[in-house]
Amino acid sequence: MTATAAARPEEWFGHPKGLYVCFFTEMWERFSFYGMKALLFLYLTKYHLFGDAPSYDLLGAYGGLVYAVPVIGGMIADRYLGMRKAVILGAVLLCLGHFGMAFEGEQARFVDGVVVQDARALQVFYLSLALIVTGVGFLKPNISSLVGRLYADDDPRRDSGFTLFVAGINLGALFASLVCGYLGETYGWKYGFGAAGVGMLLGLVVFITGQKHLHGHAEPRDPARLRERIAGPLNREWAIYLGAFAGALLVWQLIQRTWTVHGAMHLVFAAFVAWFAWFLVTQCTAAERGRMLSLVALILCALVFYTLYEQTYGSWVAFTDRLLDKNLLGLQMTAGSLTFLGAFFIVGLSPLFAWLWPWLAKRGLNPSTPVKSAIGLLFAGLAFLPMLAAARIGVDGALASVWWLVLAYLLLEIGEVCLYPIGLSAVSELSVRRVVSVMMGAWFLATAYSEVLAAAFGKLSAIEVAEGAELDLLAAAAKYAELFWMLFLVGAGAAVIALLATPLIRRGMHATDQRT
């Protein structure tokens, strides 16, 4: 039997049934993830009475860990655990984390000008975040890799299979904000977080009951190795499970000290720069050096883009909550639920751009990879102009229309569909073969680092309100206007630099000596 035939034991709508197992598992995982993320900043500032600055710090630390830990989870699954066991472990941890978030405890309050918080509830909250971080670390990289295993390398359905899988991610994100965001702010935080937990539980059930459709593709590479005893009666598999919970306990402590996470991200970034410089100088031919430099330039574009993009869960949510009229088409929305706009525009724009690029290519007008990155950065910067306009309306003492936010999301998502798809493709295309995994890790670590940078920018708009005082809307609007103008300049400036560097990047991309 050929590899292609082996990948087609049973199908549904022209694809292996296993694809739909992965589709719904990931859809519900993303539902739980984005549902919780839509509420996080508001929950911290409104329920536990965190100030804006520590809330941004925690948002950045959490986001950074969520994107960094999957690098470790993917390595453990690839070497020991296998994708099936890793996904189930991750899903169990995620369920525990999301249901833990539903434990609110007592609401924080001011007593003689001092914030009094429920210490036990906060510890449950931090532990829940840690379980979610660890769970994503095991589930996210492996469910994606499993989709690739369902198809032979030469299967023409492979690309469309990944397109369907990504559609599941976007559907999960779309409904997460609408459901969890609305429930959390309207009926109580526990209902929003609880809905996220129910979503992840459904994903776990789908994955476990759909095992027969995966046909062994998710099994560990060497099952006997997992059964090896490494400490008395403890075998390697259970050591990994215990290690995962120990890792969650470590994250539990780190995430309460956000400066340690932010500092670690800075150190990792510096270490990568040092390693990359050494690798270029000592391990690469001239052509390899050109390709690797071009790849890093594209990764830096993604770093800047996602630093801007992650404002959607920080400063954009805060601004929407405080200074926007949230009436959309006659429906009174909440700040958290309006984050659905990102996924809404991605779902609508992705098919359009999937048609546009080939249409332009047939006419010799398809932009090159670095030009697409520059376009993505430009639109990310332009997205802050509607937000700036809305903030200036606030400076005049009025609530701005929610349609400014809608326009901002439209521009931002145009940027994402230009920039994001080319990034992962460039890693495998441009990297020296022996360090492809390292460079793929660098791509995700850049996303993690962008969360830390996004938090630093968000803190520039931090608003602190004393006990019994009303929010000074004019001063707040002025702060947001200053931030949004700055971020427009960052995006537009980065786009200009990327465009000017395009000839050099293209030259490096097309270097032709033998890869190793």
Image (spheres, helix red, strand yellow):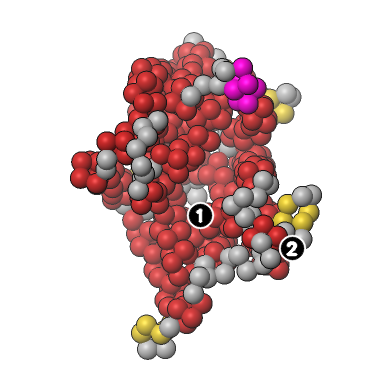
Which label was assigned to residue 299? none
At a point 50% along the width and 34% down the height, the residue shown is 422
How far from the left and from the top, in percent, is residue 344?
65, 33
How far from the left and from the top, in percent, is residue 56?
40, 39
Occupied quadrant, residue 197: bottom right
Q: Which residues are magenta?
A: 356-363
Occupied quadrant, residue 245: bottom left
Give the prevailing secondary structure in the magenta stretch.
helix
At a point 49% along the width and 74% down the height, the residue shown is 222
Q: CA distance from mark 2 to mark 1?
A: 25 Å
At a point 63% along the width and 69% down the height, the residue shown is 216
List the single residue furthest toward the right.
13
Label 2: which secondary element: loop
How far from the left and from the top, in percent, is residue 3?
64, 60
At a point 60% along the width and 25% down the height, the residue shown is 357
How far from the left and from the top, in percent, is residue 351?
67, 31
Label 1: which secondary element: helix
Using the image, determine if residue 50 lies above or below residue 383: below
Residue 349 seen in this snapshot: no
Q: Is residue 301 magenta?
A: no
Dot 2: within a 10 Å radius of its alpha carbon, few (fewer than 14), some, or many (20 or more) residues? few
Instruction: Identify the amino acid type marked 2.
Output: Pro
Which label was assigned to residue 9? 2
Dot 1: within a 10 Å radius of its alpha carbon, few (fewer than 14), some, or many (20 or more) residues? many
- Of label 2 and label 1, which has the lower sequence position? 2
List the single residue furthest toward the top.
396
Q: Is residue 361 magenta?
A: yes
Using the image, determine if residue 453 lies above or below residue 485: below
Tag count: 2
> In which quadrant is the N terminus drawn?
bottom right
Query: Is 493 or 78 nearer to us in this picture?
Result: 78
Residue that mark 1 sits on: 141
